[in-house]
Image: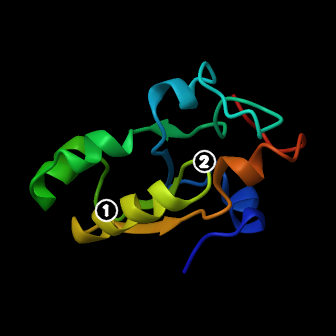
Amino acid sequence: MDVTLDELRRRLGEDGLTVLDVRTVLEYDGSAPSSCDPRHGHIRGARNLPLEQLLECRSGKEVRELVALPEGTEIVAYCHVGQRSGFATQVLRGAGYEARNYAGSWHEWSRDPSLPSD
């Protein structure tokens, strides 16, 4: 099941939850923004791991070494509109992580100025 905006808003900063931004480094830091988004950057506290790096892994072990999160960590992945993060979620699940997609992604998050971003 996907993560909703309301759930992520409530759970942001929760112990055991990692928010993973799978966009490019330039999208993450806001230097390559999408013109359709009112804000640029990333969800506050999110870690960046571009999907391209994740796809270079050839095994679940390589994914786990790259992600380097403790067993039992829940991951919420997001991108710009939920497509890349949906794919990343499948890869992460295949490597044994509890992973869910935030389908609204940055496109939705950036529209609410009350939501924390960097």
The secondary element bearing badge 2 is classed as: loop
**Callout 2: few (<14), some (14-19), or many (20+) C-alpha neighbours within 10 Å?**
many
> Residue placed at 72% from the left, 30% from the top?
40
How many labels, in total?
Answer: 2
Q: Which mark is residue 80?
A: 2
Q: Residue 11 location, x and y as percent?
A: 67, 59
List the single residue furthest toward the bottom.
1
Q: Is residue 3 left or right of residue 15?
A: right
Q: Is residue 17 left or right of residue 73?
A: right
Q: Is residue 113 above or below residue 76?
A: above
N-terminal of the pair, mark 1 or mark 2, is 2
Q: CA distance from mark 1 to mark 2?
A: 18 Å
Q: Residue furthest front?
A: 35
Check the image and tell me how it is coloured: rainbow
SS for tag 1? helix
Frontmost residue, 29 versus 16: 29
- In the image, which is nearer the foreground, mark 1 or mark 2? 2
Whether residue 68 is visible: no
Frontmost residue, 18 versus 104: 104
Residue where numbered disc 1 is placed: 92
Give x and y (percent) for residue 4. 70, 69
Say which of 91 and 52 sits in front. Answer: 52
Q: Amino acid at mark 1?
A: Leu
Residue 97 lies, with reference to residue 9, above or below; the image says below
